[in-house]
Image (cartoon, helix red, strand yellow):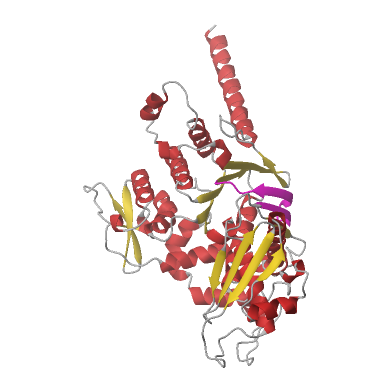
Amino acid sequence: MKFTFKNLGPINNASLELGDLTIIAGLNNTGKSYIAYAIYGFLQDFAERKRQGLPNWLNDGYLSARASASGNNIIELLLDGLPVFIPTTTDDLNSDKINLVKQFSSAFSHLKLDDLFNDNTDSFEDTTVDVLAHTEHLPYKSRSFSLRSGQTFSFTHGTNMLRIVLEQREIIDNDASKLNDYTLVRTWLNYMYLQFLLQHDFLRAFEVRCFTSVRPAISLFYKELESSRRATIRQFQQDDETMVDSQGKVWIPAERISKTSRYVLPINDEIDFVKSVPDDDHSPKDHGGLKELRQIEKMLKGHYEKHKDEFYFIPSNKEMRRPRIPLHLASSSVAELSNLYFHFRNPNGRYDQLLIIDEPESHLDTANQIQLARLLARLVNSGVKVLITTHSDYIVKEINNLIMLSNDFDNKDQVVKEFDYHENYFLHPKRVKAYTAENGTLTPCMPDEFGVKMDVFDETINSINRASTKIATRIFMSQEENEG
């Protein structure tokens, strides 16, 4: 899936294609978080539109445009329980899929960006997020979709032909749930066709979760960030002047709350996630994400628990003076990884997801940054897609090591054993997409068998090394002159 961003914060024009692991590196204020949040917002909006059931935003008659018969004739045949045959090639299906996703991205750009960034200043008036869906090499398999009425839409694609049937159940003629309205059938037909097109697609199968760069603060202050109050404030902040309540009785000037804190949607959703973590007195072994949990526990030498709406860190060292440390008294690295830990503790929070992590290296020492890179690789190899924004040369260098380990070479087993690697960490370069955010755009960094070359880090490291060498040389020369 390819995203193109125009006039998005510091980004003038940039394109990004999601890989199994996607890395966006760059200096401060180059647009990395803007892009990560825009991807999150689009995918969340896409999921929400699918959950709406009847997508009224979808163009009427979208499917019937391919048929030689009129739309009404198609509906008549379906209502009579007869199959409809529409000449359709795989290229036609791919084209329809691309156009549908473009409709999604257009609606998102025009209707959702202000809400995503919680902005009412028209900062995103000229912003566009365009999404290009991948076309499929796999055949479009037959799919059936059951409705609450008991009827079923069936789609079968054969040799240049699409066959559609609305299978009726035996119901009483006056049953109000039966699909017998032309407009309703056409709407459902378009919607089910959309589901048929996306059967192999990332958009259909994956949910998205975003861990923001302020996640330690969220873990510490989530109680003060009351959900319903935030929801009300977000509504008020989107209104330039006034707002009416649900009964239309009360007008509330927006200026009354203009000084309240604003949260972008990913932060708002992360607050809700932290507040939703249930109390649990059991060992983490009872939960999903076991390997990921163990790796975080190894990094921090302890694990997390929640009791009576309070988060705690439990050190592995039983001789510690505090056997259970409240999160607000723990180190910043402990707070940093708590949200990720509780995400993996949820048995439904592991696979079929895109995890977006903004600056995963925050508050971690260099050794733990390396371990986190290995954790990200393990996730990718287990089926999770990962996108990170980063300033960490250590994370990128370790990712490069894992890419090189996907090659065969002499004495590889010895190297793996010496540096405590595992085959679950190895990454094929084709699974990685990497970009440098700079000059208002994204510059692709093409991975090869040696990893990803990111000049943004190399230039900085080379510069400080040159400075160090020159300073040390001058000191040494001065000492020799003085001794002489």
Magenta segment: does it hold 419? no
- Outermost residue on the front side: it is 82
In the image, residue 215 above or below residue 279: above
Question: For the point 74% across and 60% down, which residue is it?
Answer: 127
Question: For the point 64% across and 34% down, which residue is it?
Answer: 455
Along the line of sight, which residue is nearer the eye, 214 or 371?
A: 371
Q: What is the magenta range?
A: 2-20
Q: Answer whether residue 199 is visible to the viewer in this image.
A: yes
Along the line of sight, which residue is nearer the eye, 295 or 368?
A: 295
Q: Answer whether residue 255 is visible to the viewer in this image.
A: no
Question: For the point 39% across and 26% down, which residue is it?
Answer: 413
Along the line of sight, which residue is nearer the eye, 193 or 461?
A: 193
**Residue 176, image x, y percentages:** 56, 90
Q: Quadrant of residue 91?
A: bottom right
**Residue 193, image x, y percentages:** 64, 67
Q: Is residue 135 left or right of residue 122?
A: left
**Residue 80, image x, y percentages:** 64, 81
Q: How many marks?
A: 0
**Residue 306, image x, y percentages:** 33, 63
In the image, residue 331 above or below residue 221: above
Q: Quadrant of residue 198?
A: bottom right
In the image, residue 216 above or below residue 308: above
Magenta segment: does it hold 10? yes
Q: Is residue 40 left or right of residue 303?
A: right
- Outermost residue on the left side: it is 319
Question: Magenta span: helix, strand or loop, mainly?
Answer: strand
Question: For the point 27% across and 48% down, which residue is it?
Answer: 316
Q: Quadrant of the C terminus?
A: top right
